[in-house]
Amino acid sequence: MNRTEGLVQRRNVIKESNTDGQKENHDNDDKKNDKNYDDGDSKETKLTLMEEVLLLGLKDKEGYTSFWNDCISSGLRGCILIELGLRGRLELERAGMRRKGLLSRKVIVKSDTLTGDVLLDEALKHMKDTDPPETVQSWIEYLSGETWNPMKLKYQLKNVRERLAKNLVEKGVLTTEKQNFLLFDMTTHPLTDNVVKCRLVKKVQEAALRRSITDVAHADKRSLALLMLAHSADVLENAFAPLSDEDYELATRRVRALLDLDFEAEAMRPDACEIMWAVFAAFTK
């Protein structure tokens, strides 16, 4: 899952609680996390990390992702894990006295409260029903179906891109069409709401150009996650391509600086989302 090479290639196109009181507190925390899953204005269309990464990868007029992109599948599974982590559903087991590394620690279901998102809830159920727990890297492989263990194929999330595209259709961002590709017909989802796409591209660009993004102790977790996940899914170039040469170089330099961070050390910071750093580590090891 190494995504450290070829950061951006510029193209010539611009545990369940025992008391009712504790359970109520967990439920309130879950609702708070869900309510704030997007840091945009309340009037804006709310998008999950998975939807944002897919939208960055979709060709606006054609309505499908590049046939040559073999990273977006695992990238979207990484989005699911981080989204669940940011919403307070998942956490990593304790590092212990021997300080287990991020990639050695198991994923623990902190809360099984449904999120309301079908994909997230399906993934959450798989993790809740799995004993013993698995690592972040294992879950990325299982959810994408990229495992040699036939017993783990039941965990594969199928038709993820199509399901996310349908979510975006319901939100009025995309539409649905049929296109003929000589030997077969394919359902595509061209862009209909250019404002949402432009806002997303601008958000990615501003996050990368913001000096504070490399100060991860104070950086917005969602902006940081979006940058790193877009890179892991090989769709970051689509957001950076319209930048001027000077801003392009600065943005790519900032992302490289993020990739060079000590993920283990960053995960030890107070209020750090350890799941997020574990996903980053899985994609850059």
Image: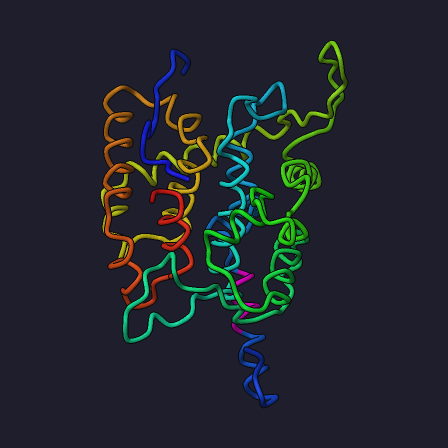
Asked whether 52 or 186 is in front, the reply is 186
Task: Let me know if residue 186 is in the magenta part.
Answer: no
Q: Is residue 283 above or below residue 107?
A: above
What residue is at 76 percent from the left and 16 percent from the top?
Answer: 184
Horizontal and vertical percent for residue 216?
27, 53
- Camera-side residue: 141 or 150? 150
Residue 34, compared with residue 153, is above or below; it is below
When the figure is inspected, residue 47 is found, relative to residue 107, above or below; the finding is above
In the rendered image, residue 244, in percent from the top left (x then y), is placed at: 30, 20
Where residue 276 sits: x, y (%)? 40, 55
Q: Is residue 50 left or right of residue 158?
A: left
Report the front residue among 168 and 156: 156
**Quarter of the figure with the C terminus:** top left
- On screen, residue 43 versus residue 269, left or right, reads right
**What residue lies at 32% left-to-right and 35% top-to-bottom?**
4
- Where, quadrant-wise, is the N terminus in this rendering? top left
40 up-or-down from 135: above or below: above
Give the colour scheme of this rendering: rainbow
Question: Which percent across, then down, holds residue 87?
Answer: 51, 62
Which residue occupies 24% across, 26% down? 249
Q: Is residue 215 left or right of residue 223?
A: left
Exactly how many numbered labels are in the figure?
0
Magenta segment, which residues? 29-35
Residue at the (63%, 37%) spot, across then down:
161
Considering the whole magenta stretch, tell me its main secondary structure: helix
User: Residue 229's quadrant in the figure?
Assistant: top left
